[in-house]
Image: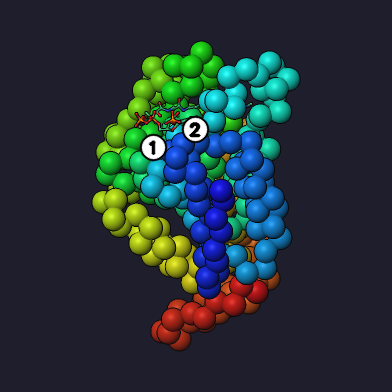
Amino acid sequence: MIQYKEHEGVGVMQIDRPEALNALSREIVDEMDALLDKLAESKTLRVLIVGGTEHFAAGADIKGMVDCDPQGARAFGFSPTYNKLAALAVPTIAAMGGYALGGGLELALCCDLRIATDSAKLGLPETNLGIMPGAGGNVRLPRLVGEAKALELILFGKQIGAQEALDMGLVNTVVPQAELMETAMKWAEKLAKRAPVALRTAKRTVKKALSCPTAEEGIDFETEEWCGLFTTADQKEGMRAFIEKRKPAFTGK
Ligand code: DAK
């Protein structure tokens, strides 16, 4: 149900449950959880692509939730797993085709970058079901697109197309369906060749800064992290390569 392949530092995790438009069952999320635990410890992973087969994911499995009481709903929760994806040190890219709805879109919101196909449909339709987003959607979406646009999507439970998603900053780019995985791979390969410690530090710093109560605290954190990069071989290599007018060969040290 979860497929995983890794080649030269680029990992591809795909949901594979086409008969239900990749609706996320408890089992799928448990598999994802176990995989993310391994990936968090990986010494080889440089970039992770998260995708679906034909569709990204049409949300959490409604059939598995319909009879839940509050305790059962809590046990169905995806957030501990989604938080593991958001906390991965390496850059992550969501490659979204078809439907990315509800818990599916919330999964993509845990990634650093999002690519959608021109026919993709995105949204948080939970209020149509008498619930609300519950796997970070109320928290991550407004940070990305602002409060008003996030509430428009959540309160109307509407699906939007890829162009509208691009216009509001929900996705980074839109590509034809046939070019989705190729584009995601190109981005990932490019990132995999860049200085890994610098990328991980930048990701950590941007995330930390977003949760700092003041800009000053964020900037203090940034300064410490920035100075720390001067302990790395990649900093020496990157700057020497510039001065020597050659391409840097980063080692990740
Ligand atoms: N769950 C279960 N099955 C689904 C599904 C879903 N989310 N989405 C699609 N399917 C199944 C359909 O039931 C159908 O299966 P059969 O009936 O043929 O067996 C098959 O996939 C094909 O779907 P359709 O026949 O409906 O296909 P259409 O092209 O006509 O429509 C659609 C596609 C995506 C517009 C439609 O399927 C749809 O509206 N699906 C539901 C989308 C949705 O409402 N998603 C949000 C789900 S709620 C939690 C936190 C968060 C969450 C859960 C817990 N805790 C903190 C505890 C997340 C909640 C959600 O994501």
Instruction: Give the residue displayed 58% in from the left and 19% down from the top.
Output: 66
Instruction: Give the residue displayed 65% in from the left and 30% down from the top.
Output: 77
Is the residue at mark 1 in contact range of ligand 1, meaning its CB lies under 8 Å from it? Answer: yes
Residue 132 visible in the shown view: yes
The quarter of the displayed image where residue 190 is located: bottom left
Marks 1 and 2, how far apart at CA: 9 Å
Residue 218 visible in the shown view: no
The quarter of the displayed image where residue 207 is located: top right
Label 2 near label 1: C-beta < 8 Å?
yes
Quarter of the figure that contains the C terminus: bottom right
Which amino acid lies under the numbered mark 2 shown in the image of this protein? Answer: Gly
**Local crowd size for mark 1, using a 10 Å CA cut-off: few (<14), some (14–19), many (≥20):** many
In the figure, 58 relative to 157: above or below?
below
Pick the front one: 15 or 142: 15
Instruction: Give the residue displayed 45% in from the left and 68% down from the top.
Output: 189
In the figure, 200 relative to 143: above or below?
below
Q: Which mark is residue 99?
A: 1
Q: Provide the residue designation for mark 2.
A: 59
Instruction: Give the residue displayed 66% in from the left and 22% down from the top.
Output: 73
Which amino acid lies under the numbered mark 1 shown in the image of this protein? Answer: Tyr
**Local crowd size for mark 2, using a 10 Å CA cut-off: few (<14), some (14–19), many (≥20):** many
x, y (%) of residue 122? 38, 34
Is the residue at mark 2 in contact range of ligand 1, meaning its CB lies under 8 Å from it? Answer: yes
Q: Earlier in the sequence, mark 1 or mark 2?
A: 2
In the figure, 222 relative to 139: above or below?
below
